[in-house]
């Protein structure tokens, strides 16, 4: 079922309305690598333009984190399943798009005033942000279908069912597909990738589709793991988040499974940068780093999210926001780990000597051990110096990077930090917890877990509209 509110705007008028150098935000965290970075420059005196409020807050697929991990005796567990806490948006031109987990629909708003342009109803919750590409919108639903719509008016172009049939079961107080589409639909080079299924014993499927007609290019079964959260892609690889488990990597051209990473504690937050995968937050708030050709963990950082640029990376923890020279940090980390590995071998050799530890061989090993400890401490000090700045932060829930600011979301508020030294340049209070941020065409979009979407823009850039 599809209802539309037609609003006709010419391309020339749209171009005039956009700020100079305006950039879109066509998918979750800006791109298929989930970089959360844009060249968009936002004003330091943003004012509220409009607020969209849902009748009900998002209905999440999973409740919060368990109280503790009894087997490993870990307390204060992080919530690793936060992909549908808010209505994450995509913004292209003067349109804003999002899916609803409570009203089973996809909505397009006018970015200038927040008014609804069109809605498209599915038969189940739409939990993840749509992807806009080539004038089309791509999204999945708990009804088990992937939808392709015309971005201009919401008209259905095609739909595709990854699962074997239309079997329905009760789930989240609704009737949903046995194979709900709980991943994003990622679009890259004319191919739409998606995943369906959260019950491994019933089958989980990863698919590649032709974006123009929805025809299946390949389909791969995933064993023992669900497909949940936002997909990521590099030029040759597809990265699949698996809820509370570790990501799985596939060849994007054939669908062949390559490997599952072996480190980290799971989670649906991830980004790809160059030849590296970064994901988390694990059970205790830890960002794990992997090289693309290795399934073993390269390094880890205490934190919830990270943004990576060629020169500086930004790390967000529960209490701090930091800027660091990530490349130098990882270089020192690898050297320190090699020394620690050597230290472990020397220690074992000393143990094997037993009563002969005071022999000349034992003395040589103890001398080497002392030198290794000094070198390890030296590299640890160098790693600490990689932090360019660290500032206290009460905004641990979300983060994006614009040209000269880091925007971060917290409980009932959002702020902008200057990238140069970390000072707060702007701050606003909102209703709800800020799990979603996006920036496009001179506007900042803030999504909160009470079902609100706030739009902020520079003063005088347009007539501020009243709340919906």
Image (cartoon, grey):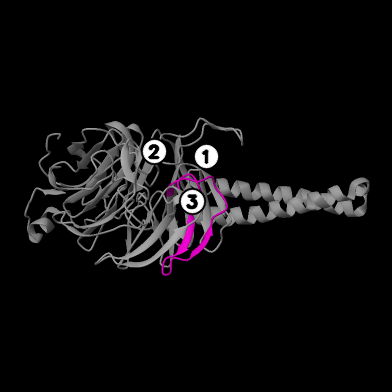
Q: Position of residue 450 (x, y in %)?
A: 28, 32
Q: Position of residue 300 (x, y in %)?
A: 55, 48
Q: Main secondary structure of the magenta part?
A: loop
Q: Which residues are magenta?
A: 241-269
Residue at image position (9%, 48%) is 5
C-alpha separation, residue under disc 2 versus residue under disc 1: 15 Å
* Mark 2 residue crowding within 10 angstroms, few (<14) / some (14–19) / many (20+): many
Residue under label 1, please give it: 283
Q: Is residue 348 left or right of residue 180?
A: right
Location of residue 281 with respect to 73 vertically, above or below? below
Residue at image position (11%, 44%) is 462
Name the element at disc 3.
Answer: loop
Residue under label 2, please give it: 397
* Residue 55 or residue 179, whichever sits in front: 179
Location of residue 38 with respect to 219 vertically, above or below? above
Judge whether residue 398 can be spotted in this image: yes
Q: Position of residue 108 (x, y in %)?
A: 18, 48
**Pointers 2 and 1 in contact (CB under 8 A)?**
no
Residue under label 3, please give it: 225
Q: How many marks?
A: 3
Q: Is residue 232 left or right of residue 150?
A: right
Mark 3 or mark 2, whichever is nearer to me: 3
């Amino acid at each position: 079922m599809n209802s539309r509110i037609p609003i006709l705007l010419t391309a020339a008028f749209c171009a005039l309305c956009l700020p100079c150098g305006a950039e879109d935000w066509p998918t979750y965290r800006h791109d298929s690598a989930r970089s959360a970075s844009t060249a968009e420059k936002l004003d330091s005196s943003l004012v509220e333009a409009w607020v969209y409020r849902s009748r009900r807050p998002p209905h999440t697929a999973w409740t919060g984190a368990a109280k503790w991990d009894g087997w490993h005796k870990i307390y204060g567990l992080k919530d690793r399943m936060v992909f549908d806490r808010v209505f994450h948006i995509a913004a292209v031109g003067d349109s804003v798009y999002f899916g609803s987990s409570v009203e089973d629909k996809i909505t397009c708003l006018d970015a200038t005033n927040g008014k609804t342009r069109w809605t498209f109803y599915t038969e189940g919750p739409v939990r993840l942000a749509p992807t806009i590409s080539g004038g089309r919108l791509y999204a999945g639903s708990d009804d088990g279908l992937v939808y392709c719509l015309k971005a201009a008016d919401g008209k259905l172009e095609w739909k595709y069912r990854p699962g074997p049939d239309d079997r329905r079961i009760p789930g989240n107080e609704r009737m949903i597909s046995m194979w709900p589409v709980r991943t994003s639909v990622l679009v890259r080079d004319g191919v739409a990738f998606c995943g369906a299924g959260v019950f491994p014993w019933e089958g989980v499927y990863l698919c590649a589709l032709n974006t123009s007609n929805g025809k299946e290019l390949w389909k791969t079964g995933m064993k023992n793991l669900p497909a949940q959260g936002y997909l990521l892609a590099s030029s040759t690889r597809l990265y699949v988040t698996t809820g509370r488990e570790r990501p799985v990597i596939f060849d994007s051209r054939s669908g062949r499974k390559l490997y599952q990473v072996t480190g980290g504690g799971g989670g649906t937050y991830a980004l790809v940068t160059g030849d590296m995968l970064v994901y988390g937050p694990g059970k205790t708030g830890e960002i794990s780093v992997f090289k693309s050709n290795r399934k073993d963990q390269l390094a880890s950082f205490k934190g919830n999210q990270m943004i990576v640029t060629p020169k500086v990376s930004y790390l967000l923890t529960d209490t701090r926001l930091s800027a660091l020279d990530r490349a130098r940090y990882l270089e020192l980390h690898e050297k320190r780990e090699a020394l620690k590995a050597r230290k472990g071998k020397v220690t074992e050799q000393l143990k094997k000597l037993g009563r002969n530890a005071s022999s000349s061989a034992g003395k040589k090993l103890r001398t080497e051990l002392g030198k290794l400890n000094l070198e390890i401490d030296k590299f640890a000090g160098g790693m600490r110096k990689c932090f360019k700045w660290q500032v206290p932060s009460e905004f641990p829930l979300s983060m994006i990077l614009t040209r000269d600011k880091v925007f971060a979301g917290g409980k009932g508020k959002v702020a902008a930090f200057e990238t140069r030294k970390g000072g707060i340049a702007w701050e606003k209070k909102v209703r709800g917890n800020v799990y979603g941020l996006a920036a496009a065409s001179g506007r900042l979009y803030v999504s909160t877990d009470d079902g609100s979407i706030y739009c902020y823009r520079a003063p005088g850039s347009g007539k501020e509209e009243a709340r919906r």
